[in-house]
Image (spheres, helix red, strand yellow):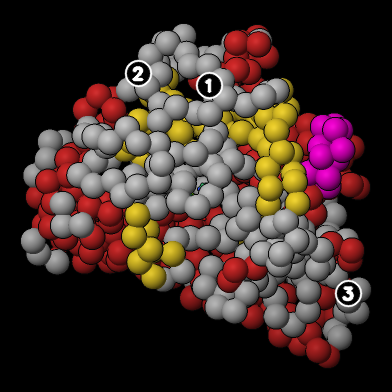
């Protein structure tokens, strides 16, 4: 196995070799090695990712493989380093952050010629660890590992996770910052992505007025990750920023499609490649609630709530635009990029919602209104997002095509099919749900106006409406079992989520189910902290 290191070989590093926390200026990274762990053991690995990378699973399972994936050993060509970046956290500039517990190992070329950086998260202190230990606990590592691969299987742009390794060492964490620290099992995830460069990598140079390195990093990013845009010039920079805006719009629209809430959309957690990155206190929408955030640190502001994500992505792009301004010396090209975000998001969002609803390809004004009207209906009662959309494709063709059906019969038929999505049993025509019944009638009218092969329509809907997502309580159950030493539920969940759009009828009863009542307020299921 041979790794490369374009990032380290072509960009300036920290001249100081002091491993203790320090400010790192005029440099993009600090060379630092993972700290070996006592007793590493492989908990799980992603066979689909190993296949894509062209890595033998025998190697992953071997003593040598586990030692590399635990940070105890380096493979040939690896030049480990931690990246220097800053960021806006919860709306405020936070200065230098950097990889405090992540260490990039090197770049791996897959059989198709694509380069992938491998990164260990939880592999010990770096010059960016500030007051923390550089480690990660099993519960948060398992969540990152599972969710990365689940998101990929859903078709959402994301960093990947190759392996989850238990370190055999304990880590001390105060999960809810309430003075109740306890020892928890430690773990390391090997994350894999074409690059881990974030908005914050550019922001730190702009904040320090180090325009030379700002430009170097931009040129490196374009040359290695956007080569189709050409050599550096004002036009290339503009095309690049526009592409970042486009990809970010795409990513956030995909989150809205599947009901994913990132939870900490700080600019240091925004990938320049438009990938979902840094799975921390994330969550999945059970009953639809645009104002829901899983992150306890955000309970006052709800800044990173589900429905705010598009707007926050835009705010983050404005911060990136500010940071990149010195490359342009004018605002217009950057403004054009931001405008692209707005227009791209609006059209993608409408396209995505109408695909979820199985609307005709050409949208009438009535059809556009349906999307907004539905979002208002979600507030009337608790409706499970995943189950609702999935069941919608089961509504029979006759429901749309019949001409002599009464309104009552239409609504009753609708309730028969999607009723399971409601947390409280619904009575057809219940007065409190008037707007929903209006919506149902409007929906029927719009779908009737299109020409459909209804079997084909259902198939298409089932390709954008997943049947299975990583519900918060499912992840928590897998964690509690893994902490007791039983990794069966983790593997079962991983297997399920590799085919989220498939029916998998034998798993339906357990996994195509609403959040159980016990999970409504349980830590880990509905509330998560950044302590990980
Ligand atoms: P996050 O909120 O996870 O994106 O982390 C924000 C910053 O805190 C990043 O610079 C992380 O590297 C750093 N950080 C988080 N947890 C730890 C830890 N246990 N040890 C060192 N640094 C950490
Ligand atoms: Mg982060």
Q: Position of residue 410 (x, y in %)?
A: 81, 73
Q: Where, by quadrant of the figure, is residue 180 drawn?
A: bottom right
Determine the residue positioned at 46% across, 34% down: 103
Determine the residue positioned at 81% across, 63% down: 522
Q: Is residue 121 left or right of residue 412?
A: left
Q: Nearer the viewer, residue 174 or 260?
A: 174
Residue identified by numbered label 2? 4
Which label was assigned to residue 52?
Answer: 1
Q: Position of residue 364 (x, y in %)?
A: 49, 71
Determine the residue positioned at 9% across, 44% down: 233
Q: Position of residue 60 (x, y in %)?
A: 62, 16
Residue 169 at least partly seen: yes
Q: Nearer the viewer, residue 490 or 169?
A: 169
Q: Secondary structure at mark 1?
A: helix
In this rendering, the answer to whether 373 lies above or below 459 is below
Residue identified by numbered label 3? 424
Q: Of label 2 and label 3, which has the lower sequence position?
A: 2
- Residue 481 included in the magenta stretch of the image: yes
């Amino acid at each position: 196995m041979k790794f490369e290191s374009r990032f380290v070989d072509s960009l300036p590093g920290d001249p100081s070799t002091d491993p203790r926390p320090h400010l790192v200026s005029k440099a993009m990274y600090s060379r630092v090695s993972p700290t070996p762990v006592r007793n590493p053991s492989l908990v799980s690995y992603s066979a689909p990712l190993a296949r894509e990378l062209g890595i033998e699973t025998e190697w992953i399972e071997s003593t040598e493989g586990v030692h590399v994936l635990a940070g105890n050993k380096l493979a040939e060509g690896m030049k480990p380093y931690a990246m220097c970046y800053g960021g806006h956290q919860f709306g405020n500039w936070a200065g230098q952050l950097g990889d405090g517990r992540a260490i990039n190992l090197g770049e791996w070329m897959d059989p198709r010629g694509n380069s992938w950086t491998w990164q260990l998260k939880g592999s010990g202190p770096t010059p960016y660890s500030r007051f923390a230990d550089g480690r990660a606990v099993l519960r948060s590592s398992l969540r990152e590992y599972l969710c990365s691969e689940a998101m990929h299987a859903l078709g959402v742009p994301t960093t990947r996770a190759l392996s989850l390794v238990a370190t055999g060492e304990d880590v001390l964490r105060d999960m809810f910052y309430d003075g109740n620290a306890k020892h928890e099992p430690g773990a390391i995830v090997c994350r894999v992505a074409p690059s881990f460069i974030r908005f914050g990598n550019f922001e730190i140079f702009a904040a320090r007025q180090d325009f030379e390195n700002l430009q170097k990093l931009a040129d490196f990013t374009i040359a290695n990750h956007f080569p189709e845009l050409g050599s550096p010039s004002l036009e290339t920079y503009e095309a690049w920023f526009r592409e970042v805006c486009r990809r970010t719009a795409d990513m956030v629209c995909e989150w809205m499609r599947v009901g994913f809430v990132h939870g900490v959309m700080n600019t240091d957690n925004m990938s320049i490649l438009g990938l979902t990155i840094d799975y921390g206190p994330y969550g999945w929408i059970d009953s639809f609630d645009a104002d829901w955030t899983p992150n306890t640190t955000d309970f006052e502001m709800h800044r990173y709530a589900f429905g705010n994500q598009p707007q926050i992505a835009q705010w983050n792009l404005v911060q990136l635009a500010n940071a990149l301004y010195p490359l342009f010396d004018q605002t217009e090209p950057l403004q054009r990029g931001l405008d692209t975000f707005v227009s791209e998001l609006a059209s993608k969002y409408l396209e995505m919602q109408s695909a979820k609803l199985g609307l005709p390809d050409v949208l009438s004004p009535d059809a556009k209104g349906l999307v907004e009207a539905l979002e208002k209906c979600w507030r009337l009662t608790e409706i499970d997002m995943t189950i609702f959309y999935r069941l919608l494709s089961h509504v029979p063709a006759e429901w749309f095509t019949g001409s002599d059906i009464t309104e009552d019969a239409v609504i009753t038929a609708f309730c028969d099919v999607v009723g399971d999505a409601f947390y409280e049993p619904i009575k057809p025509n219940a007065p409190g749900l008037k707007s929903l019944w209006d919506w149902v009638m409007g929906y029927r009218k719009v779908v009737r106006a299109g020409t459909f092969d209804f079997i084909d329509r259902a198939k298409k809907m089932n390709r954008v409406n997943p049947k299975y997502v990583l519900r918060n309580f499912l992840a928590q159950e897998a964690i509690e079992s893994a902490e007791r030493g039983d990794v069966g539920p983790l593997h079962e969940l991983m297997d399920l989520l590799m085919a989220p759009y498939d029916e998998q009828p034998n798993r339906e009863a357990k996994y195509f189910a609403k959040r159980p009542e016990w999970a409504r307020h349980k830590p880990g299921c509905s509330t998560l902290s950044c302590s990980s």
